[in-house]
Image (spheres, rainbow, N blue to C red):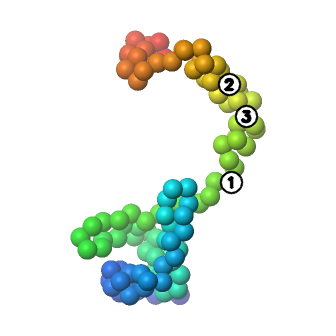
C-alpha cells in the first residue's frame, strides 16, 4: 500500500475472501493466514492505529503477535537466580509447603509478604 486509505467495509472484504484463508494450528490456537488484498487491508488497519474493527455488530481487537526471542528454558538457564527460585519452588511443592490464594492474600495483608 502506498499510504492511500482504503474505504472498503471490512465485513465485505472478509466475506469476499474468507474462502482463501488458511487455518494454521498453533499451540491449541487456530491461526488464519491472510494473504493478498485482505492482508494489505489488515496491515493498514493495524499500522494506522485502528486496531479495533467492527464486524456484524461485534468489535474485534487486532494486534501483532511476535514469536519471543528466547524460550522460558533459555531464560532460566541464563539467570541463575531465577533457576534457584524455581528449584526452591519445586522443592517446596514436593515437601508440601504450599499455600492457597486466600492464605497468600492474608500474608500480604499482614505484611508477611
Label 2 belongs to which residue? 87
Where does the image place residue 44, in percent across and percent down from the top left? 47, 78
Q: How many residues crowd mark 1 within 10 Å: few (<14), some (14–19), many (20+)?
A: few
Which residue is at a point 51% across and 56% down the rendered structure image? 28
Q: Is residue 42 left or right of residue 96?
A: left
Which of the two marks, 2 or 1, is nearer to us in this view?
2
Where does the image place residue 111, in percent across and percent down from the top left? 44, 13
Q: Is residue 29 left or right of residue 78?
A: left
For the residue pair 53 and 77, the one nearer the viewer reads as 77
Q: Visible in this render: residue 3?
A: no
Residue 84 in the image: above or below residue 96: below
Residue 26 in the image: above or below residue 43: above
Label 2 to label 1, Cα distance in Å? 24 Å
Label 1 to label 3, Cα distance in Å? 15 Å
Kind of element beneath mark 1: loop
Residue positioned most to the left = 57
| Label total for image | 3
Label 3 belongs to which residue? 79
Where does the image place residue 72, in percent across and percent down from the top left? 66, 43
Q: Pick whichever of labels 2 and 1 is earlier in the sequence.
A: 1
Which residue is at a point 53% across and 81% down the rendered structure image? 35
Label 3 to label 2, Cα distance in Å? 12 Å
Kind of element beneath mark 2: helix
Label 1 belongs to which residue? 69
Q: Visible in this render: residue 53?
A: yes
Amino acid at each position: 500500500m502506498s499510504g492511500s486509505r482504503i474505504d472498503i467495509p471490512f465485513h465485505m472484504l472478509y466475506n469476499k475472501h474468507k474462502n482463501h484463508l488458511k487455518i494454521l494450528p498453533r499451540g491449541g490456537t487456530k491461526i488464519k493466514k491472510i494473504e493478498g488484498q485482505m492482508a494489505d487491508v489488515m496491515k493498514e488497519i493495524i499500522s494506522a492505529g485502528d486496531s479495533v474493527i467492527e464486524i456484524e455488530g461485534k468489535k474485534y481487537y487486532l494486534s501483532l503477535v511476535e514469536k519471543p526471542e528466547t524460550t522460558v528454558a533459555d531464560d532460566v538457564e541464563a539467570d541463575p537466580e531465577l533457576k534457584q527460585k524455581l528449584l526452591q519452588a519445586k522443592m517446596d511443592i514436593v515437601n508440601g509447603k504450599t499455600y492457597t490464594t486466600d492464605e497468600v492474600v492474608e500474608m500480604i495483608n499482614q505484611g508477611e509478604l
